[in-house]
Amino acid sequence: MKEILIVVLALFYVFAESAIIHGQENKSKSDWYIGFGIGSGRGFAEGDSFQKIYKDWGDDAEVRINKDSSYPVAINFGLGLILNPYFHSGLDISAIRQQCEYKYGGWDGTAAMQINNYLAVIKYYPIETGFSLKGGFGLAAFYVSTEGDIFDDESEEYYGGKAFLFGAGYDFPLGDTFNLGIHAEYSKQTYSGNKAPSYTEFFNIYISFYWF
């Protein structure tokens, strides 16, 4: 873990230093950005989608339990520095969550799963505006919870780990200090521990709103 982090920080430093040198004659009008995004996607735990896991939980040897899964909701929050028109670096927080309602007779219950990423990222704009590429590395968290009398007992589980992300997007400038964008991202998380899943993943597409 320590060796991976050292390599990532070294690469991050090289990219940042290169970005500053490359853009010293073409400085951006702002030094920072902040924004958020919302969309949807799919979450996976050890290869099985959240949807499949919910379905398996709802299967019973004698009776099939009625269940109603929500659509996955993905959110993103970012802030950081504009090194120059080509490179941005900062902190990204992203998450995907889905839940399912179970009903059988007079019993009911709710199960939910959520993956969170807390990443240091760098964004590259090859032609200064519009299309961008993003990569990141950092920490991850996976939450699983169940509640209701249809389950044997209520529970909430949390697993921490590390994650990496890569993605691409396109920003549409609206005025001098506001961007509206669309992004597609993939991330993978790994965990340690006897009860923890070996890995999770999520793919999300979201609309972003950024000020700079």
Image: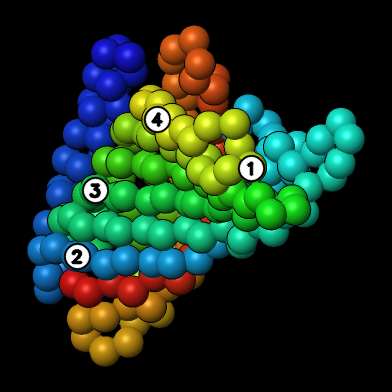
Query: Which three-letter amino acid code belongs to the residue tagged 2?
Result: Tyr
Residue 199 in which image quadrant: top right
Q: CA distance from mark 1 to mark 2?
A: 46 Å
Secondary structure under tag 2 reads: strand
Q: Position of residue 37 (x, y in %)?
A: 38, 66
Which badge, 1 or 3, is on the more N-terminal residue? 3
Compared across the picture, whether 198 is left or right of 57 comes to left
Query: Which three-letter amino acid code belongs to the residue tagged 1?
Result: Ile
Query: Which three-letter amino acid code belongs to the residue tagged 3?
Result: Leu
Question: Against 24, is 165 above or below?
Answer: above
At a point 56% along the width and 49% down the height, the residue shown is 110
Q: CA distance from mark 4 to mark 1?
A: 22 Å
- Residue 114 got which mark? none
Pick out the residue farthest to the bottom.
Answer: 175
Q: Nearer the viewer, residue 58 or 36?
A: 58
At a point 19% along the width and 34% down the height, the residue shown is 13
The residue under label 3 is: 91
The residue under label 4 is: 158
The C terminus lies in which quarter of the figure? bottom left
Secondary structure under tag 1 reads: loop
Q: Position of residue 94 (x, y in %)?
A: 38, 51
- Residue 33 got which mark? 2
State yes or no: discs 3 and 4 in contact (Cβ < 8 Å). no
The N terminus lies in which quarter of the figure? top left
The residue under label 1 is: 150
Q: Nearer the viewer, residue 74 or 62?
A: 62
Secondary structure under tag 4 reads: strand
